[in-house]
Image (tube, rainbow, N blue to C red):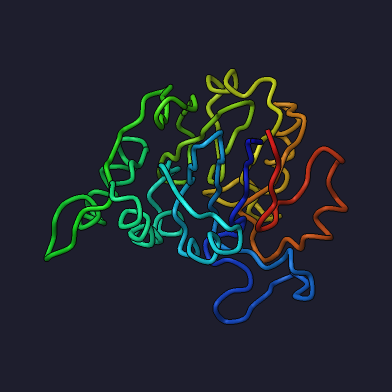
């Protein structure tokens, strides 16, 4: 049984196209420019792990035929990463057990406040989640199987977001600065999935030049650019990139 990583959504906070029908610079005839909000899935042995619960999580699960979930890890508490949290209820009813979620102290505290009914009984609603605050290194365990995950904080505008590293894969979807002390965790990667919002500079995200700089500094075997805004057309972006760097698209996956 192969381990698989899937990018469920690679769009920025409004996705592509926007709710108004705006495609920006993206060619609407290219299906790879249809981007839902950022989320990802790890299939490791018999473990099914979700990274973030985007507002589009239901359609992402259906499209990628994900039938179960064992745990969720959160990068941060912004709405485009968390708003689909209540969609997980059917898995709790199906498996008859709560889903553990993992995140930084800040992220977990914000989720406990914003989605109290998911963690504590409220107005007849039964709790569906168990909150777990992460350490630098932690494990997600299911029976006799587990995956080791390393985490560290990166800057994302006014807040800190969490980067995750496991099995020579790094996922850093929302970021505009990585402290120098953490580059030691990004050596010898097979895959780097990194924020690349726009061509222009942005106060909360890496732009094209930033993402290329980080990729050249880290030197992974393959870099995948995610969190793509509507000014980045898939085909045009791919033509600009070195061979070892590619744009993400919804449903992109690889075995590891």
- Count up the numbered dots: 0
Q: Which residue of the protein is positioned furthest toward the bottom in this rendering?
A: 20
Q: Residue 63 location in percent, x, y?
A: 60, 63
Drawn side of residue 135 relative to residue 115, left or right: right
Drawn side of residue 28 relative to residue 93, left or right: right
The quarter in which the N terminus is drawn is top right
Q: Residue 227 location in percent, x, y?
A: 60, 53
Who's the residue at 64% across and 61% down the image? 229
Query: Which quadrant of the view contains residue 121?
Result: bottom left
Who's the residue at 64% across and 50% down the image? 226
Drawn side of residue 113 relative to residue 7, left or right: left
The quarter in which the C terminus is drawn is top right
Q: Is residue 216 above or below residue 73?
A: above
Q: Residue 21 location in percent, x, y?
A: 62, 81
Q: Is residue 148 above or below residue 1?
A: above
Who's the residue at 30% across and 57% down the image? 93
Q: Residue 73 location in percent, x, y?
A: 43, 41
Who's the residue at 82% across and 37% down the image? 244
């Amino acid at each position: 049984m192969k381990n698989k990583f899937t990018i469920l959504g690679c769009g920025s906070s409004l996705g592509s196209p926007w709710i108004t029908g705006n495609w920006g610079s993206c060619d609407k005839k290219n299906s790879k420019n249809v981007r839902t909000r950022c989320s990802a899935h790890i299939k490791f042995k018999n473990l099914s792990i979700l990274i973030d619960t985007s507002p589009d999580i239901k359609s992402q699960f259906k499209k990628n035929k994900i039938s179960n979930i064992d745990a969720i890890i959160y990068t941060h508490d912004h709405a485009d990463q968390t708003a689909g949290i209540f969609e997980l209820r059917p898995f709790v009813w199906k498996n008859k057990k709560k889903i553990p979620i993992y995140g930084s102290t800040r992220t977990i505290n914000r989720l406990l406040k914003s989605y109290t009914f998911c963690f504590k009984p409220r107005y007849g609603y039964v709790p569906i989640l168990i909150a777990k605050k992460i350490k630098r290194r932690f494990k997600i365990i299911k029976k006799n199987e587990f995956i080791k995950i390393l985490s560290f904080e990166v800057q994302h505008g006014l807040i800190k977001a969490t980067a995750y590293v496991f099995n020579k894969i790094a996922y850093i979807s929302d970021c505009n600065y990585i402290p120098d002390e953490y580059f030691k965790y990004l050596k010898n990667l097979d895959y780097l999935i990194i924020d690349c919002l726009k061509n222009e500079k942005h106060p909360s995200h890496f732009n094209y030049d930033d993402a290329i700089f980080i990729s050249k500094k880290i030197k992974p075997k393959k870099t995948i650019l995610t969190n793509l805004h509507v000014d980045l057309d898939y085909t045009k972006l791919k033509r600009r990139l070195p061979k070892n760097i590619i744009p993400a698209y919804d449903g992109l996956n690889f075995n590891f």
